[in-house]
Image (cartoon, rainbow, N blue to C red):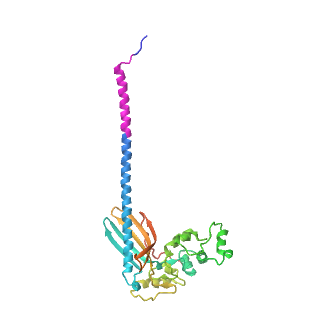
Amino acid sequence: MSAELYTPARVRKASDGFIVVAVLWILSALAVLATIYAIYVANTAMALAANDDAVVAQGLISAGVELSAYQILSAPKDARPTRGRLALRMGRASVRGDFRAETARIDLNAAPKELLAGLFAVLGAQPEDAQQYAERIIGWRTAPASESRDGEASLYRQAGLDYGPRGAPFAHVAELWLVLGLPPALVERALPYLTVFSGRAEINIRDAAPEVVAALPGMSPDGLAAALASRAEPTQGAPSTPLGTTTEGGDAVRVRVRVDFDNGRRLAAEVVILVRDFGEDPFRVLSWIGDIDAPLPAPRQQTGLRR
């Protein structure tokens, strides 16, 4: 009867093999950890760079807004520009922007029914439907004569909605999404031409988009062409200022600023300000919308107008 004896040499060979395997596992784990850490460092560096761009852009956008306010306030009040542009270069970024008085847009709280209906018709709605959409907007912003006879609210209840009309002025143009019966696609097309900051029933015919001018009651294709052509005339007189229009700008101004970095990144914002001739601050911000890494849409041109 024989038994295999484990000598010290055999024990050392077995333990040496185990140590080698353990070391290889440790090295593999360290390699994985090193890779993960490298990815983390790279992502952190990218995030910090992105945050740095956002911080710089915020400052540059603020500068663009302040420069726009300065351009407006530096002129006498009766001769202030209703629109303008700005461009500057600072560090590793270029800043471009423009400003335009809010009277270039249709005010949801002040516009008459005919102007609202005209806009919806220009944007593709049938005339009968456009009139109904305008009626619902008037109903949303109008206080009911009495709670017991609030016919507008009953329409919302009949439609199964768990809310009713505000019965007061629109607080934001986005409330248009809540107005009963308005098609979402039509609301989306209408928003670039609407405001709640103008406070005027009239629109500035020299600054308004062609779609807004075309929405004026009684505006014919020939009248629209003449009104748009008159913008190139240097005279301040108003040979083409039909009823419901003005050439005044008002105190509410929309500023659009875009920051283009040398690394290709682009940040933009759209800010509505109220310029003031009193107090310590020359203006007050009414609305600030920032689109990170998304350029502002180009100003709309006359395309596919329909009446």
Q: What residue is drawn where x is 38% and y is 63%?
A: 55
Which image quarter: residue 21? top left
Q: Is residue 98 visible?
A: yes
Residue 170 locus on image (x, y percent): 55, 74
Of residues 93 and 165, the one nearer the viewer is 165
Which image quarter: residue 34? top left
Q: Quadrant of the N terminus?
A: top left
Q: What residue is drawn where x is 43% and y is 84%?
A: 229
Q: How many marks?
A: 0
Of residues 109 and 181, the one nearer the viewer is 109
The reply to whether the magenta stretch includes residue 23 is yes
Residue 104 locus on image (x, y percent): 47, 79
Residue 100 locus on image (x, y percent): 43, 77
Q: Is residue 126 visible?
A: no
Residue 204 locus on image (x, y percent): 47, 82
The reply to whether the magenta stretch includes residue 277 is no
Residue sitting farthest toward the right: 148
Describe residue 152's horizontal placement relative to residue 71 as left or right. right
Task: Identify the main secondary structure in magenta.
Answer: helix
Look at the image and give the residue range highlighted in magenta.
5-29
Up-down relation of residue 92 to residue 207 (above or below): above
Q: Quadrant of the C terminus?
A: bottom right
